[in-house]
Image (spheres, rainbow, N blue to C red):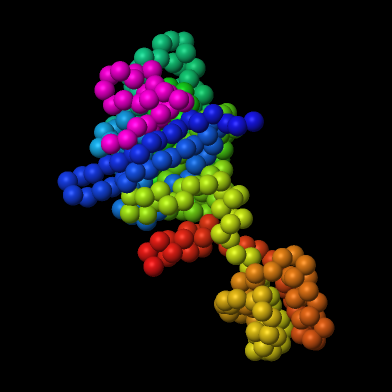
Amino acid sequence: MVKELAIRTSGLYKQFDKHIAVNNVDLEIGEGEVYGLIGPNGAGKTSLIRMLASAEEPTAGEIYLNGEILRRDKTSPTLKRRLGYLPDDYPLYKELTVWDYLDYFARLYLLKEPKRTKRLHEVLQLIQLENKRNSLISTLSRGMKQRLCLARTIIHEPIILLLDEPVSGLDPIARMQFREIIKVLQSAGMTILISSHVLSDLAELCTSVGIMELGFLVESTSLQELYKSCATQQIVISTLENLEVLLGELKNNPLVGDWEILANKDKDSVKIDFSGNQQDSADLLRSLVTSGIPLTEFHCTQEDLESIFLKLGHKQTS
């Protein structure tokens, strides 16, 4: 079954004076996807997200949400209510309590009682701040504040969520907590576009990714297809003997490409790029054992999302 498109752009273009921030972007995101937007600073990610959120007017091009055209004027109020937008620098009213802050935004979205109170309890449980409902925002940790911002973003039950660098500056535990919330929202059927420089988080969350460079969307595909087409198989090999003996054997194999010696106090290890299939990997292992090299590790893996991004970015700029 072909998924309906939650987000589609056609020829989307944004220019500030002489600077082209977004250049003729045709983007398609299916309903229920978590779409990761990747790119260096200045690639156009924030400008693209702001246009999708109706916070910025496109210079040219069109945006469709669930098949309906999005306009920045007052002709699309129902459509805009389907959106939740979390920018990377959203201010908090630190003199308010957690409850009053969320209640304020719930009232702005015209949520009526008893639904409003019920919804506040729901989002507080989701972001794990129910026990902080009466605490001043100024007393919260950075991770708690970011989760509270997310709660504000989803208080009106949007079906499309736009997140611009939501885990920037968070520690690993706070990032993990944020990831778990995103997974819950995805399981509920929400479509989520998230930009981040923490590619390991995107690799865990996303179904599809888009890569932006200099305003262009240079790649947009499912994560599975990206790995299939761009990821190089890698093998980590460790030995008890001098590493030069192992390297000598590896250099004789035509399927072995680049290699990197790994720093390890307890053993000599090397990571190689390997262009063969599973049978070729098995043959390589057999040949090393037959050569009498005492192996302690032979582990097949593939390039991670960060390596693929750097490789694709280099191709675009070279």
Where residue 170 appears, as percent x and y from the top left, is 43, 49
Above or below 237: residue 130? above
Q: Is residue 67 a member of the stretch shown in magenta? A: yes
Q: Which stretch did the figure color magenta?
A: 60-89
Q: Which one is in front, 37 or 199?
A: 37
Q: Position of residue 62 (x, y in %)?
A: 34, 32
In the rendered structure, the answer to whether residue 89 lies left or right of residue 37 reads: left
What residue is drawn where x is 34% and y is 18%?
77
Answer with left or right where residue 139 lies relative to residue 286: left
* Apparent side of residue 257 relative to residue 76 in the rendered image (left or right): right
Q: Is residue 276 visible?
A: yes
Q: Is residue 87 visible?
A: no
- Residue 33, located in which quarter of the rendered image? top right
Looking at the image, residue 60 lies above or below residue 120: below
Q: Residue 300, position in %: x, y?
A: 69, 66
Quadrant that contains the C terminus = bottom left
Taking depth in this image into account, of 76 and 306 the one nearest to the observer is 76
Residue 248 on image: x %, y %: 67, 88
> Looking at the image, which residue is at 37% across and 64% down?
317
Vertical relation: 289 (above or below) 98: below
The residue lying furthest to the right in this view is: 290
Q: Nearer the viewer, residue 123 or 3?
A: 3
Single out the residue that lies furthest toward the top: 113
Residue at image point 56% right, 53% down: 226
* Magenta-colored stretch includes residue 239: no
Q: How many marks?
A: 0
Instruction: Residue at 28%, 47% (x, y): give it.
Output: 21
In the picture, the quarter occupied by the N terminus is top right
